[in-house]
Image (spheres, coloured by chain):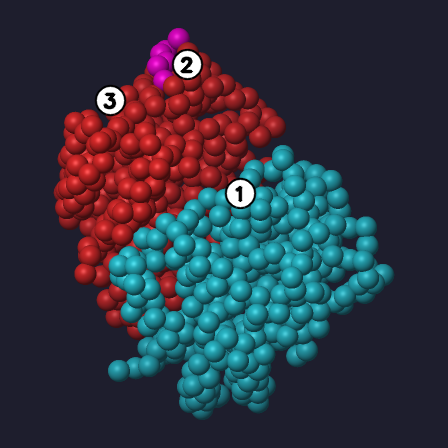
Chain colours: A cyan, B red
């Protein structure tokens, strides 16, 4: 049987051990004779699941005590609106445009009536193949926040050094490289991330927010208020219970494998293998500026759309799934998140080498 | 080993056959060698899952072709805001207050600046133990909609006949009795329901909306726009994929057991058994007006809070789980949704009889 490697940008590959545990206890969680899906979210069994998941995330990411952790719904897309509604009503906000996801965040913030959006830097001119340069002279300490996308899932661009400016609240969409980096939570005011790439299944969004940024605002709907969600320990209403449980299992798996430091080392190892091969290939290229290359999302192409198509089809038949690049970039993309096995990278490179040998003209 | 019966108000008991199927294919969905949790939401495998779930819901509920079905996130709580934002900006809306959930919906609508909320009837005076009387003379056809809660999960009050008024758009929170009733979709403009009671796990919300009510409104955030969600087939961003998959399995199970008509018959059978016993008991009472009693949520009490506590503790020890009533009502509550087995009702009644024999004084 062909070994299947899943390069999907998310939902994505999950640790096999996690799926096996979820499977083993699917009809009887911890002796309750009930599935986790059947547990009341107010039951002690489920509250214990949430509390453990939060503590595990705190330990793995070294989250300081003055930060709240929220488990919400709606993905990054909801955060694009929820974040400015909570932090920036009647104020100016500053964004760095690094690609598709930053663009979406900017568009959502601009739609809000009483928020003024200032894009201080953009790499649109070079097709979003780098993190644009900017410095203290571009940053307004009176803005409610400075917004970055730490990793662009589609363009394959990432920050390796987090920009820091005195008195500026940095907020980040960390959806595609949360826990696969060496960032420090204390450098951010707010971090958000959908779970479906590095931390588990789709349907739960993690928000990490410094407590001084929690503001009661009774004009906001309760479900959109960070303060209200924090007051209710993410249980304002029924949370996505099973998704949170699986995130907890993935966090346990991360902890057992050495934590965020090990995930970051693994991410570097996987990415360097693939970039090294691509950079020495006479067929495949990656167009991202070397110092801004993502560790988790690696786009590549042959510069011949027909050959790209052929590669994707042959790779799919050989068990390398979901390698098609996003339509806005074309070519191929390998998403290599925490749970992606290094053997899959070696196997992909071997397959690319064989394809290159046949097609390098 | 004690048989466990789970009376939770939601998340709630699910069909064992559904859990077994989810368990069997958890690591390898349909020959993909991937878990459903690992499938890209843009993959043909997952699109097929969503399309099948939608068609099954359409068949079971007899949803006319001029209605859209959306799979969203955020639960009923998000709908309390999303509904008026989409249908009623700058307009008046009318609500019937039947209890805790209607009260929450009214509160959320009142928080919106440009919506005028008119509560046309309330049963607050009798402790929400009935559906309040109202008629055409109370209903303003110029209001954007008339809002009802078809079943109050906490109070145990339900509509058995849906009020209809010419030219009035009726919208309904059907969270706790969707598919366990004989309502007709064409009597409603919008129906919404969290899945976690009658249809599956928490984390996905079903919205059924008549197409003429879909309005483009570029001042709304995309994720809150019904029209945008409909244009994107509920895939504006990553949906809660695993929750949708399990809902599809539950819908298949409902279809295989005779559809909504059978679920409604089963609901009546379960509820009538329990109400008959309670009405003939000299210890337990249910205070809801007979013609407004819920089929899915049955509160009962002994009128002695200490005895209630004792009952709940003894029942729990005997395998009858989550019978504690909501703190706002006290006493006990048996939630009997689609997947609740009739044997569990017989067993509960036997247990209540034995308790009654010991305590009727």
- Residue A223 is labelled as 1
Give the labeled residue for mark 2.
B139
Secondary structure of the magenta portion, mostly?
Answer: loop
Q: Secondary structure at mark 2?
A: loop
Question: Gap in Å between the C-alphas at discs 2 and 3?
Answer: 25 Å
From this view, report whether residue B294 is shown above or below residue B226.
above
Picture coordinates of residue B123, whole percent (x, y): 40, 20
How many badges with numbers are in the image? 3
Q: Which residue is mark 3?
A: B290
Q: Which percent across, then down, holds residue A209?
A: 64, 56
Query: Of residues A233 and A61, which is closer to you in this image?
Result: A233
Magenta region, residue range: B132-137
User: Is residue B125 toward the left or the right of residue A72 in the image?
Assistant: left
| Alpha carbons under labels 1 and 3: distance apart | 35 Å
On screen, residue A266 versus residue A133, left or right, reads left
Q: Residues within 10 Å of mark 1 (few under 14, many from 20)?
A: many
At 28% from the left and 45% from the top, the residue drawn is B7
Q: CA distance from mark 1 to mark 2?
A: 30 Å
Foreground residue among A105 and B132: B132
């Amino acid at each position: 049987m062909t070994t299947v490697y899943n390069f999907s940008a998310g939902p994505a590959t999950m640790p096999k051990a996690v799926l096996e545990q979820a499977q083993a206890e699917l009809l009887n969680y911890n002796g309750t004779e009930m599935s986790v899906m059947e547990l009341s979210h107010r039951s002690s069994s489920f509250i214990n699941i949430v509390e453990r998941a939060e503590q595990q995330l705190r330990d793995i990411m070294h989250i300081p005590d003055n930060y709240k952790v929220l488990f919400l719904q709606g993905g990054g897309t909801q955060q694009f609106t929820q974040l400015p509604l909570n932090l920036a009503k009647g104020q100016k906000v500053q964004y760095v445009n690094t690609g598709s996801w930053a663009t979406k965040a900017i568009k959502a913030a601009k739609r809000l009536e009483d928020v003024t959006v200032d894009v201080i830097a953009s790499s649109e001119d070079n097709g979003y193949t780098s993190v644009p340069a900017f410095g203290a002279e571009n940053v307004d300490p009176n803005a409610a926040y400075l917004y970055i996308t730490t990793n662009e899932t589609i363009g394959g661009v990432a920050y390796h050094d987090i920009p820091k400016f005195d008195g500026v609240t940095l907020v980040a969409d960390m959806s595609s490289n949360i826990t696969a980096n060496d960032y420090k939570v204390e450098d951010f005011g707010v971090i958000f991330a959908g779970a479906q790439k590095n931390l588990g299944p789709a349907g739960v969004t993690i928000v990490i927010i410094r407590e001084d940024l929690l503001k009661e605002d009774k004009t906001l709907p309760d479900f959109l208020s960070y303060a209200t969600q924090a007051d209710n320990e993410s249980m304002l209403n029924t949370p996505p219970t099973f998704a949170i449980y699986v995130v907890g299992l993935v966090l346990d798996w991360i902890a057992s494998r050495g934590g965020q430091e090990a995930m970051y080392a693994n991410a570097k190892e996987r990415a360097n293998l693939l970039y090294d091969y691509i950079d020495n290939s006479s067929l495949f290229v990656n167009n991202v500026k070397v110092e801004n290359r993502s560790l988790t999302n690696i786009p590549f192409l042959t510069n011949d759309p027909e050959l790209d198509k052929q590669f994707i089809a042959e790779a799919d038949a050989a068990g390398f799934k979901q390698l098609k690049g996003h339509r806005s970039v074309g070519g191929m993309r390998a998403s290599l998140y925490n749970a992606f096995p290094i053997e899959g990278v070696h196997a992909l490179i071997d397959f690319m080498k064989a394809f290159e040998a046949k097609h390098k003209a």
